[in-house]
Image: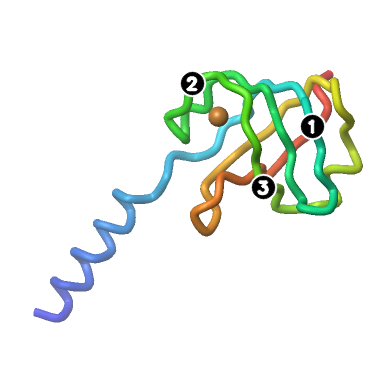
Amino acid sequence: MRKIAATAILLLTVAAAPALAAPVDGQVTKIDNAQAKITLKHGPITNLNMDGMTMVFAVADPAALKTVKVGDKVKFEADRVNGRLTVTKIEKAK
Ligand SMILES: [Cu+2]
């Protein structure tokens, strides 16, 4: 019985796991180093079920904010981290 319950929990966990983050095109419109936040005008984010828009994200690694500046076109990945929409990876678009 206990084994069945554990299997059911495992299956539920897998089903609830978010889709893998995929690189998204965006443009930096604002950088807030003090709050470790970035505002991005972004294209559709499939893993977050989000259409294109301009919005604020938290940044997982504040040091990443030093690698981009306002106006830069970027490729980034975003995910929900502790309930906050967070940029987990960002780089200047080539
Ligand atoms: Cu958005």
Residue nearest the viewer, comparing 7 with 77:
77
* Residue 72 appears left or right of 5: right
Residue to which mark 3 is pinned:
58
Q: How is the image coloured?
A: rainbow
- Using the numbered discs, state the Cα–Cα distance from disc 2 to disc 3 in whole angstroms: 18 Å
Q: Quadrant of the C terminus?
A: top right
Residue at (83%, 27%) from the top-left corner? 92
Is label 3 in a helix, a strand or a loop? Answer: strand
User: Label 3: few (<14), some or many (≥20) within 10 Å?
Assistant: many
Give how far across and how far down residue 50 sits, in percent.
47, 27
Q: Amino acid at mark 2?
A: Asp
State which image quarter holds ligand 1: top right
Of the two numbered discs 1 and 3 on the same chain, state the one appearing first in sequence.
Answer: 1
Numbered tag placed on residue 51 in the rendering: 2
Residue 22 relative to residue 6: left or right: right
Residue under label 1: 30
Mark 2 Cβ and ligand 1 under 8 Å apart = yes
